[in-house]
Image (spheres, rainbow, N blue to C red):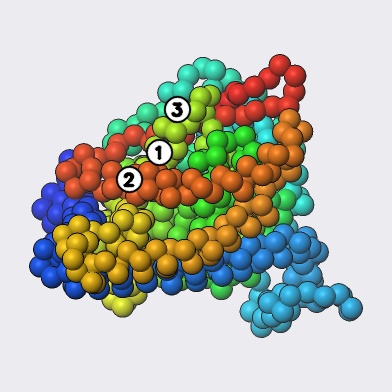
Amino acid sequence: MTDIEIPLEKNRKGHYRFLEMVPGLISWGMLALPFVLSLIDVRLAAFFMFVYVLINFARGVAGGFRAIQGYRTMRQHQQLPWAAMLQELAAGAVPERVQRPKWHHYAIDRSKERPLLMPPEELIHAVIIATYKESREVLAPTIEALLASDYNMKQVILILAYEGRAGEETEARAEELVKTYGLQFRDALAIKHPRLPDEVLGKGANVTYAGRELKKYLEERNIDPLRVLVTTLDSDNRPDKHYLTALSYAYIVCEDPVHSSFQPVALFANNIWDAPAPMRVLATGNSIFHMIASLRSHALRNFSSHAQPMAALIQTDFWSVRTIVEDGHQFWRSYFRFEGNYRVLPLHLPISQDAVLSDSYVKTIKAQFLQIRRWTYGASDVPYVIHMGLFRKNTIPKHDLLGKIWRLLEGHVTWAVGPLLVLFGGFIPVLFHPGSYAALELPIIVSHVQTVALAVASVSVFLCLKTLPKKPIRYKRHRTIFMVLQWVYLPVTTIVFNSFAALYSQTRLLFGRYMSKFDITEKAVISDAPGTGRAAKL
């Protein structure tokens, strides 16, 4: 069987080490290109910047439309009677005079020709909640959100995967939560993750250990892994009440469930009213990105909370314990384990997460940068994918592989340099050629394009207001006004927290200074109860 593990840091040599340098070399090269072209020929520099800005503008306009479409799709799916539809699927018929989506009728018709994977009541969900030192105020609402689902919780196994290095307080908290809520589930387990050799400190190692313990649990009870669908949650994740029901529906009608995973929409909205304005802008932007991504099934990847069949996880030996980006990396592990026969299917329902919020403004700024720095370290997948795809024997169709390599590399390079070039690149040629007509006209053209782009950005303001949870009673009406005015931070947050974070991660890869520790993102809970304030860090 093909080894799908990412190489240990000490073994990354030769072509693999060079491939690690590629994202950083391209990004820094792109930033230098307008200067170099300006020295060669100002018209080349102006043409390059004009085309680049125009391409990004077109993407922005398309993204605005897709964002609205993604939001509408998500809201439509939230309003569907998933429990009734699941029963109709099992019965093979829709009651008369009941309106249902066309795809539901199609699924029922198809089930008559190709039987469902299993009856819905035979499916078991295992929900792994990864925790480090999070307080009860963070963890309990996540468990309660699960219990509020329109689903039979006796078909759900709750697993609190906690770090042994977190100490006795964390262990006692996990045991207490399992004892408090356990009887409402099919079963509830608190699994302690010990420190093991060659593991990166982080979520991947924690949930992998829990997954291996779950495998033993199922073997002892003779439960077929194909019957078990595993969802991983961060400690602050609140699934939509229809999540488990819709996930059950998607799984049992899936044509190839073992080679599929299921991705809900990540919304960073739990504490959005409490977070500082720059963090609110970033949180909303990230939410919009995931609404758009849910419509691009060809490019969809695992992110944060996702679900995968236990039968598939066993074949990939669960998640990677060697990288801090275990979620996105899991896509590639599965892709190469199944020789390209793997896809991520969108589940158009939200799982709400916290925006970054620590116990001081400075700490919040730092925590936000660390979070996005961890996400942008996904550039470490570039050498892995090229190495596995082009330097290892496989039967993956080359057109599919090369398309995925291009999207992966281009996405990380754009993450790093796109905002900088769009905002400042148009002014570079005129610095070298102040008398050139092309150089003088370029900033004017770029500013006109950016003006139109700002109008398109109003979509972000609209979706921000539409996705806001109910305003806490501690805030007055004028707080809503700040939710609109906050968007003046957009250029700053885009450059500081996206471009700089991505450049930082790629530059570290360029010089072989690896990130070997999962930076825990600090988040705080603010309560309306008298005498309470910021508590519970995540």
Residue shown at 22% from the left, 46% from the top: 507
Disc 3: which residue: 362
Q: Are marks 3 and 1 in contact (CB under 8 Å)?
A: no
Is 449 left, or right, of 149 in this rendering?
left
Disc 2: which residue: 500
Badge 3 density bin: few <14, some 14–19, many ≥20, Cα 10 Å: few
Residue shown at 60% from the left, 24% from the top: 534
Image location of residue 93, percent across then percent down: 80, 76
Whole-number angstrom distance, CA of label 3 to CA of label 2: 17 Å
Residue shown at 16% from the left, 51% from the top: 17
User: Mark 2 or 1 closer to N-term?
Assistant: 1
The mark closer to the camera, 3 or 1, is 3
Residue 342's disc is: none
Query: Disc 1 residue type?
Result: Phe
Residue 369's disc is: 1
Query: Disc 2 residue type?
Result: Phe
